[in-house]
Image (cartoon, rainbow, N blue to C red):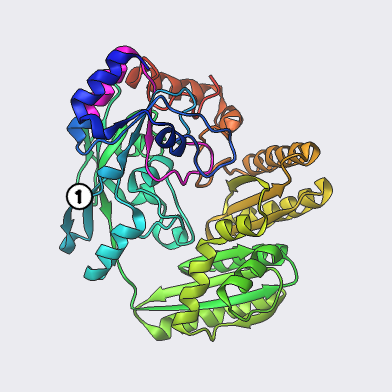
Amino acid sequence: MQSRVLKQLRSILGIARVSVSGADRQLHAQDQSDFDQVLPDVVVWPQTTHEVSEIVQLANRFKVPVTAWGAGTSLEGNSIPVQKGIVIDFSHMDQIVDLHERDLQVTVQAGVMYKDMNAVLSEHDLFFAPDPGANASIGGMIATNAAGPHTIKYGSTNENVLALEVVLANGEIVHTGSRSIKQASGYNLTQLFAGSEGTLGLVTQATLKLEPIPRRKVTATAVFNNIMDIATAVSEIIGNGMQPAALELLDTNTAKTLMDDADVQIQSGPTLLIEFSGNTAAWMEKQMEVAQIICEEHGCINFDDSYSEEESHRIWQTRKQIRRLAVRQHPSHKWLITDVSVPISQFPEMVNFVEDSVSKLDITCNILGHAGDGNLLIGIYYKPNDRKCAERAERFKQMQVSKAIRLGGTCAGEHGIGIGKRKYMVQEHGYEAINLMKQLKDTLDPNNILNPGKIFLN
């Protein structure tokens, strides 16, 4: 890092919010993926959009790479500073700017943490519905279009973003969208920046759609003989026009982890977690009755909807911690985490393909998914020195992605592209679309300073 750049960063932020210490750089060198860490040259903590603008303008002048950092919970290397440079940590920009309670909206800074924000919103009987499980930052959720179990009912992050404040690569500050729910004015710049992983601009503030907290929730566990039967049941539940809040597929390994840590007595085996939420108990009971009939028609061997509110909460909280719990159960192992998403009608075929591939390649993994929207997640674990298993895991990832794309799906359902999925972009989108994306990147970031090395191979 050039001394004059460091000097000017300290002039903008003060000495205390600019760090070149090994400890701070180490903390911002790797996300929750298993990709190699890369130490940035410097870490900075802005407190205002104006400060972010000055930092980026300086970086652009000296052609220094800039990587945004929220909570570091990404799973595809999205926030690893692969070309070093400056990491902008948004943790000091963590304010709820304005709550528009009657409009069911909130405006927040990018560094606000998802769970912390919802804790405040709950005092007003409101919540931000996209639920990635981890306590991710709002800026990070927007950058990767994060989703989760309740996407089937409420949509992913990008579907719940109304307006953004963004700092461009030249330091200019732009505002996109509005607080109107219906918008048909010009290009949809909000959706252009959302999901772009900080490669087109840095989100500093966002206005989000909120939902009323449901008065009632009911949860059921449906245990099957195999996950293929679960996939078929899910396809029929959705095809019948039902409105579950969540449908989570867990293979036997994952279900056992949930059983052991949630202290909930369910029969061992491939499991479908079902949730309905709303304000009318009779409606939810009827929906659950129909769901039970469908599950039993497709091989469900145990259906239990007798959980108390406390037990249900514990089940779902444990589900959100599955990855952490699985990592704890397999210490010192390497992990390859991958996800794909397909049309719901193709979900059974995708699940069948995954099961067959896991068996043929002899790999050990956890299979789970937000089944209601066709999203399948695989966590493969192996010993660091097992080169052959690492090769088989990578081969599985390639096979899974290719199959999903052939079925009309995508290589990245909710984790984004980052480093790990770059090589599949042409396969999914074609050269013409990729070239258009690169033209947009070149136009908005001609010096390629914003999160370089992500999304595109070159």
Q: Residue at x 45, y 58 (%)?
A: 151
Residue 132 percent location from the top left of the image? 45, 55
Q: Is residue 386 above or below residue 309?
A: above
Nearest the eye: 180 or 203: 203
Nearest the eye: 240 or 189: 189
Secondary structure type for disc 1: loop
Q: Which residue is mark 1?
A: 180
Q: In which quadrant of the rendered view does residue 258 lie?
A: bottom right
Residue 342 percent location from the top left of the image? 59, 49
Magenta residue span: 52-78
Residue 359 percent location from the top left of the image? 81, 52
Residue 149 in view, yes or no:
yes
Does the magenta portion include 365?
no
Residue 251 percent location from the top left of the image? 68, 63
Left or right side of 387 for 155:
left
Q: In which quadrant of the rendered view does residue 444 lie?
A: top left
Residue 173 in view, yes or no:
no
